[in-house]
Image (cartoon, helix red, strand yellow):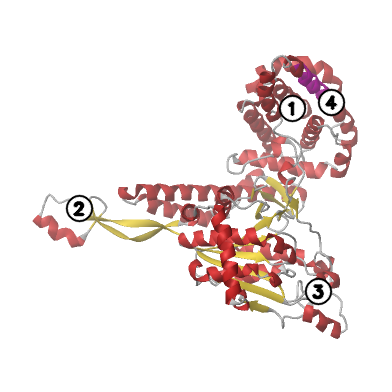
Amino acid sequence: MALDRQAVSRQSDPGEAVLRQAASDEAAVRQAPPSQAALRQAAEDQLTQRQATLRAEQREALCAAAVRALTGDASLHYREGRLCRDMRPLPLHAPHLRTDPQQDDFASLRGAADGAALRLMHSDAALHSRLCPTDRVERLVFELLEQLRCETQTPPGMPGLVQNLRDRFEAWSQAFYRSGLAEDHLGILLYTVAQIAWSRLTGWPVLEETEGLIEATRAAIVPVLGVSLAGLRRHRAEQGAFAVHALELARLVGDMIRAVRAEALDDAKDDPQENDDKAPRTAFSLWFDVEDDEYKDMAVALTGKSRVLDASEQGYRAFTTRYDREIVPGVLVRKALLSEFRERLDERVAAQGINVARLAHALKAALAISQRDGWSFGEEHGRIDGRRLAQLVSSPAERRLFRLERNTLMADCVVAFLIDCSGSMKAHIEPVATMVDILTRALDQAGVTTEVLGFTTGAWNGGRARLDWLAHGRPPHPGRLNELSHLVFKDADRSWRRARTDIAALFKADLFREGVDGEAVDWACGRLVARPEARRILIVISDGSPMDSATGQANDAFYLDNHLKAVVARHEASRDVEVLGLGVGLDLSPYYRRCLAVDLSVPPDMKLFAEIVGWIGGGGRARKG
């Protein structure tokens, strides 16, 4: 399959219109009077960050298109520099495949994308996993060698792809060298192995900038590794035969590193302080470890393919909607009990000691945009104010005859919190309610419109909807089979102060049953789309996958999961609402492109809120373990 590198690079910018608008906004911001220097600087910083984010998204989109074109796999996409399939990062652990879309140039990103595509095309993942050694260092070397082998299997007639691969490896090599990681024995040994293996397999010379640095190490290790290196080049077209020599080379390198470590420990016996100083540097020299540590601290939501949904011509459906309800939980709780709930929530909020004013300022800076707000008169430069011409006649020395457009940061934004009120969330509801109450109050102070919503079911195991299905003779694959309850704790037209008591209805224990996430997200997005604000953000707070036992039993286990994925993908494609997933002790990345996993076993603190602010405003993926 041929792919014209220049043609891909000439594809239209999906964020071009937004970038033009951002440039227009930037020009307007620069006209602000000197007295508003701080405001102008904040607006310029925000515009710069927004433009960088848009360019990073464009680059990722182009790289993903190139990977899909090479592999023929339409489910591949990039997220924060990681190649993903159906929202899950692929296990590509070679160090030079890790990129930063906001820091690396496009040639480097394309090289990493082309390398990932070749890995998927020419490497048997099951065989590689079965052969992978258990020692950490040996696994590192084995991963690198397999990736370099795949990068030699370039399709004919694609010199641009070959150059992309070279650019990416050399960029990674320069970054590794300039970071100082090659200054200790282990770092320079691993770096030298990477350079000579790359040169032997691809035929390219080692990086000229570091050739002198590695010369002594290369002369020392090549006699030991020479046979294995020759075998790598001879069998680079066959994964199984190549693996024999790759494993042997990895073992030899592992032996060398263990010998260096043992020698260092012997030398440090008489100087424990020296040993303590070297330990962090030794650990840091292995920064490109093959373990996927980013996802080890949090469990990942379990999902899969829905056979019923894929086979259905009409797609997702509900057997009946006659029992679905939209409820205001605050009116279902006795006033005295609701007041007790509010006091309980206030005590938890006070115990956290969160500076709400500071949080509001941070949220406003993250979400506000610069907008024209009238005129500033009596200025010494700008446009002539016709109303002051008479003053010029009477006072020829008067200079304050001009006017300037006044700009101010305004948060033209609405943020909705959609809380999963399924049974398992009952155990987390106190810290969740505390977090939501603090954020809602801070957003209200920042001038951001907010909603606090929830979703659950009207009954366990289907309720009246399932009884109707049974009465109709149990037709196969009935679709969603429960009665939905969509909850409104605070609507957008009420301030936090007026709705604060109703928010405490989150403590109502009998709300928590089962959850149909996809329809709840669609409902919440519909509410936001009806709002006049320019930016709309929905934050879904959940601790698990969609779960309704009646629906799962009558269809299949992943029926609701796949509908949730489809709903989120549709809103991401239309860009009408930004849908974010906040996982409570769970990584929700199978469902939400933008997600944050938090551990609420400890009360939320200012550090967590700062990370949430950056996540909401910046649009990137983050984690909090």
- Looking at the image, residue 569 sits to the left or right of residue 608; the answer is right
Residue 576 visible in the displayed image: no
SS at mark 4? helix
Q: Which residue is mark 2?
A: 400
Quick check: 190 above or below 524? above
Mark 3 and mark 4 in contact (Cβ < 8 Å)? no
User: What label does residue 263 carry, if any?
Assistant: none
Q: Amino acid at mark 1?
A: Ala
- Kindly report which numbered mark, 3 or 1, lies closer to the viewer in this rendering: 3
Q: From what the image shows, is residue 220 above or below residue 619?
A: above
- Tell me the residue at 63%/44% (across/down): 6
Identify which amino acid the numbered label 3 is placed on: Asn
Measured in 3D between alpha carbons, the distance from the residue under mark 4 to the one under mark 1, in whole angstroms, is 11 Å
Helix, strand or loop status at disc 1: helix
* Pointers 3 and 1 in contact (C-beta within 8 Å): no
Predominant secondary structure, magenta span: helix
Q: Indicate the amino acid at tag 4.
A: Leu
Mark 2, other Cα within 10 Å: few <14 / some 14–19 / many ≥20: some
Pointer 3 local density, CA inside 10 Å: few below 14, some 14–19, many at least 20: many
Q: Specify start and end residues of the magenta stretch as a single range.
A: 249-263
Closer to the camera: disc 4 or disc 3?
3
Residue contact between numbered discs 1 and 2, judged by CB atoms under 8 Å: no
The residue where tag 4 is placed is 249
Q: Which mark is residue 461?
A: 3
Labels 4 & 1 near each other (Cβ < 8 A): no
The answer to which image quadrant residue 96 occupies is top right
Residue that numbered label 1 is attached to: 194
Tell whether position 253 is magenta: yes
